[in-house]
Structures are given as structure tokens and as C-alpha cells.
Amino acid sequence: MMRVKLVVQVRLMPTPEVASALECTLRTANDAANWLSRQAHERGETSRKALQGFAYRDLKDRGLSAQPALHVLRKVADAYTTLRANIRSGNLGKPGSKRRSRVEGKPIGFRPDAAQAYDDRCLSWQVDEQTVSIWTTAGRIRGVRFICSEQTHKLLAERRKGESDLFHRDGMWFLIATCEVPESEQREPTDFLGVDLGIVNIATTSDGKLHAGRELNRYRKRQLALRAKLQKKGTKSAKRVLKRQRRKEQRKATETNHIISKRIVTEAERTGRGIGMEDLAGIRQRVRLRKPQRVALHSWAFAQLGRFVEYKARRAGVPVLFVDPAYTSRMCAECGYTDKLNRLSQRRFACQSCGFVDHADRNASRNIRARAWQLWRSGAESHAPAPT
């Protein structure tokens, strides 16, 4: 049976002594990762096997036991693998560009409080008692209490499997655990629900349902103005407020995406349809916009919404296809005529050939539905787009 991997977050409630040990552990692990990254960059050897061959004993001498040392090796190797993938895909610019040269010319760095992975040898969960036993550089510490929601507690008790990550943020300690949930058997769809993604309307379905982004966009503008005001002020109290505010916008966008994705998947499941979405991978590199519009584009969490829809659909057995978005906003959903002049404004679509008039986003979502349905009938399988 196929399984869907979910991550759940719990908050640790350590005593001051335990918090100090955890802080020392993260600092030691990330200092070791920075040392290893410099060595790997100088030697030009970044594979896990090569790193283990020349650095394993040195990592243990730096205060890490066997398993944490292996996790540091893997963290550094994976970071360089990701870097090479971004270079190959052009995300860091063309060969010889300033940005790419700057990135290639120095080793990857890790923050002192960057997350550290733990496996079951270094971290054990006592879910019923809501405590964990965790390895630190000061030794094994048992009975560290954690708090979480009832739903998270149930997932941990029934589905937790694999590694967990320890991280420190805003003075609080967290563990992120991986849970494996059985994937529902994928059913044959009767049709597809097309979903057009946008900034003004976050998602528009081919049924005509608009999930407006007005409230979220207004909130972002308020936060942007507040940040500018506090940064200009520059006092200690202003900096404290900035620190409190910095993740509120991200949490608001995540909550909105969760709500919208759940509604889309529920509607597709209720009507026996699949879901067709736009594959917008690389759009930030392709699109050229004026400076005021760049803020909106780079604040647009479309990839996160796509991931939320994809994993919720897998749990419900709903197939998802990501289609080529080219010209979906300019093509008439009735006659197929494609012209830039068809898109009269952000909201209005009027076909210059057959005279068909519709909301521009709904017209685009109908084109996406048609492309997804055509792909499915030609034998395409449900999939998510490649990460960028």
C-alpha cells in the first residue's frame, strides 16, 4: 500500500538546564557542519561517501557521537547536492554571472541554530506520557516534555516513522516528526476540476468558484508598510516588534492555502472528479515585472498551495495533474481561439472570434480542466511537478 508522508510539529518545554544543553548541541553540530563544508569546498569532494572517508573521525573529535556525526555528513552532502541541482536548472543565473560566481566561490554556511536531524537511536518518543528522550553533547536527557494538539498526538501515536528534526526559533524549541499515512486507492475520475492560480484570486475553479486573495493581499500590504515604518525608526523597541511580526505573514498565507486546498479537494472528491492545476515551476525566473509587482509575485505561495492540494488529494484518492499553463489566459474555452487581445483586463475575457465573454480566471480554469482531461485520457498519471 502506498503511503503519504506528513510532518507534524510539537513544541518542547525544556527546563533552563535542558535548553542550555540543546542549544550547545545545535551549536556544536552546526559548527561541525560549517567546518566540514569548508573542507568539502576546498577539496572538491562533496559526496557522502567521500566526506565520511576523510572527516568522520574529526567530527567525533568535535564532540559528536556516531549517529549525529553521520547526520552532519549527510546534511552537508545534501546541501551541495541541492546547490548543484539549482546551478544545473539555472536558478542561480547563467555561467559567469555575478550571483552564480559568488555562490560557487564560497562554501555553504549553516546558521548556529539550524535544524539537526535525529533518528530513533538518538531520540525516542514516549507519546502517551508526552515526553522524549534525546541525545545532547551533555549526554542523554530523558523526560523532556512536549505539547501538541490532539490530532498531532494521535498521528504521533499511530503513524510516526523515520527521523525527526530539532530546531530553535524565537526562543522556543520544536521537534518536527515524520508520519506515514496510508494513501487511498486512486479512483477513475469522471471529469476534472480545473484550478487557475493567481494573485488577485488565489484560486479559481472551472465550476466558477473564486477563492479571492483580497484579504491576504491587504494584510501583506499592511505588514509591508509596518515593516518599513519600524525599520526606519530603528529603535530597540521597534526591532523587538519586527522580530515578533516577521513570521505572522507566512503563517497567515499557510493557513489560507490550507483552507483553499481542502475546499478544492473536498469538492473534487464529492463530485468524483480529478484535479487539474497549472505547473508554474520556474515562473519567478521567467516573468519580468515592474518593481511594485515583484513584491506581490515573490510573496505568492503558489507552490505551497500546489503541494497542499497534491498531498490532500493523495489521501483522498483523487488524481491530480499539473498541466502546461501556456496561453490558458488568452485562449477561448468555447472555440479555442487564442489571442492576446482576448484578455481585456485582469477580470474580463472576451473572445475576438466567437464573442464568448466570461470572467478571465474562470475561462483559464476551464482551459486547464480541458488539458488535464485530455492528458488523463491519453494515459498520463497523477503527479506533482518537479521541485525548483
Image (cartoon, rainbow, N blue to C red):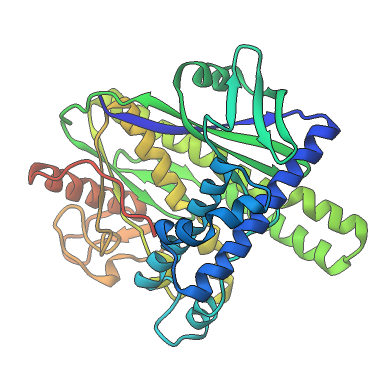
> Which residue is painted at 38% across and 65% down in the image?
85
Residue that appears at 37% across and 36% down: 311
The percent position of residue 306, horizontal first and vertical second, equals: 39, 46
Left or right of 70 in this view: 227: right
Locate residue 158 relative to residue 133 in the image: left or right: left
Going 42% across and 70% down the picture, which residue do you hit?
Answer: 91
Residue 142 or 386: which is nearer the viewer? 142
Instruction: Give the residue at the far bottom of this rendering.
Output: 96
- Quadrant in the rendering for residue 285: bottom left
Q: Residue furthest left?
A: 378
State the residue in front, 218 or 94. 94
Image coordinates for residue 317, horizontal then vertical, percent: 27, 27
Q: Position of residue 372 (x, y in %)?
A: 20, 46
Q: How many marks?
A: 0
In the figure, is residue 39 to the left or right of 278?
Answer: right
Q: Is residue 113 something that shows in the picture? A: no
**Residue 292 as seen in the image, left or right of residue 315:** right
Image quarter of the C terminus? bottom left
Asked if 363 appears above or below 187 in the picture, the reply is below
Residue 196 on image: x %, y %:
35, 50
In percent of the image, x 49 and y 77: which residue is there? 104
Asked if residue 156 can be seen in this view, the reply is yes
Q: Quadrant of residue 209?
A: top left
Location of the N terminus (image quadrant): top left
**Vertical placement of 320 versus 387: above or below?**
above
